[in-house]
Image: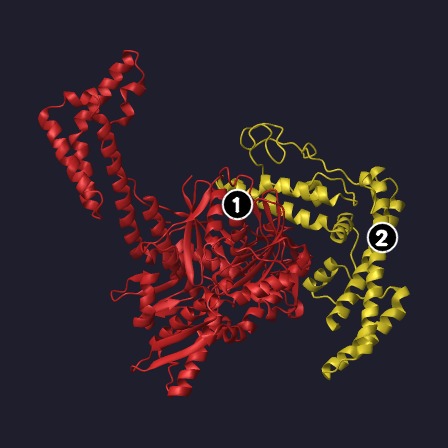
Amino acid sequence: MDRIIGIDLGTTNSLVAYMEGERPAIIPGTDGLNLVPSVVALDADGHPVVGSAARAALINTPERAVYSVKRLMGRGLEDVQEELALFPFRLADDLQPGEVLRIKLGDKTFTPPEISAHILRQLKRNAERFFAEPVSKAVITVPAYFNDAQRQATRDAGRIAGLEVLRLVNEPTAASLAYGLEKKHNGVAAVYDFGGGTFDISILKLNEGIFEVIATNGDTHLGGDDIDNLLITLALDDIRGDMGLDLRRNGEAVQRIRQAVIEAKIALSANEQTKIDLELPGGRRYQRELTRTMFEEMITPIVERTLGPCRHAMRDAGLEPAQIDEVVLVGGSTRIPLVRAVVRELFQREPHCELNPDEVVALGAAVQANILGGGSAATQDMLLLDVTPLSLGIEALGGVVAKIIHRNSTIPASATEQFTTGVEGQTNVAIHVLQGERELAKDCRSLARFDLKGIPPMPAGLPRIEVRFLIDANGILHVSAREQRSGKQAEIEVQPSYGLTDDQVEQMILESFDYAEEDFRQRQVIEARNEAENILTALGKARGNAAWRELTKEERETIARLESEMKRVTPGEDYAAIRRAIDALNQATMRLAERMMDTAVSSALKGKSMETADVGEGPAPPHPISKAEFH
Amino acid sequence: MAEPETKVALQVEETHHPQHQCWNCGDMRATRFCRSCGKVQPPMPADYFSFFGLPRKLDLDEAALEREFYKFSRKLHPDVFARSAEREQEWSLELTSQLNDAYRTLRDPVSRSEYLLQLEGVEFEEQSKAATDKARASGEQKKQSVPPEMLEEVFELNMLLEEARANRKLGERDEDVAQQLQQMKASLEERMAALMTELHGAWSDWDALVARGLIGATDRERVLGKMLDVLNRRSYIRNLVRDVNEEI
């Protein structure tokens, strides 16, 4: 089984993790840090830059950089008006209503899945460098309250990045897996996950390694970003009032202010007061004292918005706060003392925060990756049973929604509905699928419109079309249909609302070959390096073999020369040089390998075991390396 | 609640499943899994009771059902098949969705009873959840007939609700109305509890019939009819409670 990595694709930061023996661990980036900022920028040559390196671009070339793109995943223009007012997203000028969003970076445009794919590709590279081998399979986490379109967009991002996404796992559930490894006991746990851009609450029943989610709720528009925006607005108003300077349209200044207020926010988690102090364009300084009391007063309305979803989830679970045994804090925003106080008050108990709230989701993703890979001693009894966060319905006459799969149903879940025609000879039936809790279709999220086509012409009401809706373990919907009288499998045309079609994703995978080439080059280097190291090891062992002494002095010298050449080039990045060294050394050791083989065969004939003949350890004959494939 | 010993025992063994030939090794005794090579088999249509190997009895041991659900989940869940062939992954997905749908329906006393009625071919009407959704899906107007013994109470309740709504529009709150609504709610909830007792009575009657092999069409009609009546009244009251909750 190939290695499977666990990825937390976060609004503010992203991480990649794996199981190191029986414990999950984070894989650091080239800068040695565990967190990769979810920032993507294009450099002067138009190449993508991701993470800490891109963060500088937010200030220097804000028109070529983007952050918090997760807020736009799977959304349409009309969904993101609030985001557009608060975040410096620059959308393509020629965007059509109903189209997948496109964001401008310099003079190019990218969809949110393509930008997320840049982040994923960076995480994949970090993992490949760490393991010194290619990685192509991943578990990616998503907010529990993500709808179908947001989940599909995340899966598309994985595909564009060259990753086979084996499972999308809900972030709070992933966190519970990481905690579950630590302490195994039964009971009811609530996971309060307040991150950079989203809020989730999940309530789970733990039973002998089964993690059964019983209710989940949340808000995909609520996170630390909102707190930052409050502080940015405060600073901008101050600056306008005190200095008469309107910086709202100044991208660079806004980003400087943003970084300063984020630092202040973080400082206020440890200190009672802090000072914002930064230089503005034109050399003037903005300075301001901020106390924790003022800060808490400002953010109380935001923090209190998390309480509604918590109460909903408890009601759906049929539980009172006193019946919840453990509360777990996840997400960077739970470091804020006010957030902890609110959680303590609501659940009437001290929440757990032993695991780093920034890392626990990625660690849990690694646990799930391990489970999918066949498990280990630590995970063999563990099984995650998650739920669908939103009800699935179909639009009926009069624009009302008939719910067919209710929220908090354990997934995979399915429902079968019968449809018929209303007019004689009708051959098409249109079905509108929605997600949400409201009564009217216009208030729910439109998932897709299907056209059941090719229904055999019959009198009205006679066709019996059975449509099966199935939500898989990723929370993604599949639909199939059959006309029962004719037995005919009806054709289903899925028109995803604000989603990429398969063709579009394929196209993006093709376009991403520019980056794939870079990945391919790195992979080639890694593979050649591994091969070279194998040869060096084998050669070291061969020196103890009888065959070595049968070589001429000249032959032995040539081998030694090529060996030191190989040792010189192997640590470098020059694939061709490593390859040449491999080929040359393979060529030079050909006779040695043959001699060793002969010795082994004659030893075997003499009744010696193959093991002592050491035949397996000789240098391998030259062979072409297997070509890396990108899916 | 009936005594534990009257509850339906869950059959842990899968012997009740029809045997067929394993697609993988050809063994003739395959059920949900093959007895000889252990491979998962293609899903077969099954009603929710037979999925769990249960007779169509209603007084279920819900704790035992949960244990069975966990046990099947460990065997059937797609996570277990992540490394299997695509076909087996599809079967696992299908089987697990059957398992989850079956468990969701059977673990709840009301949805379990409604499901049994549906299986037994009893036409739904009026206020059941299934009927509400069905009426919506087909765009029909749902029938709403008031249980006769409740006519007066419902009339009074509607007056109160209207008053409360009118007050709310004016931004006022009448403590007297609020208190009366609370009292109404308490009395409705009492009725719900009484109906649950009646429902359990109907279960016992039904389970006794099943134990006797469902002899006697008149008995069958009578018991199912009683259950339908209880469920209809219950969902009518549940809707009233919901209306009251909205106002409180």
Label of residue B197 in the image: 2
Disc 1/disc 2 C-alpha distance (Å): 43 Å
Crowding near pointer 2: few (<14 within 10 Å), some, many (20+)? some
- The answer to which image quadrant residue A441 occupies is bottom right
Mark 2 secondary-structure assignment: helix
Identity of the residue drawn at 38% across and 85% down? A246
Q: Residue furthest top?
A: A606
Colour red maps to chain: A
Dot 2 amino acid type: Thr
Q: Give residue B139's position: percent from left, percent from top.
A: 70, 66
Q: Give residue B5's position: percent from left, percent from top.
A: 81, 38
Residue at numbered disc 1: A181
**A195 or A98, nearer to the observer:** A195
Label of residue B81 in the image: none
Colour yellow maps to chain: B
Same-chain check, marks 1 and 2? no
Q: Is residue A181 left or right of residue A611?
A: right
Dot 1 amino acid type: Leu
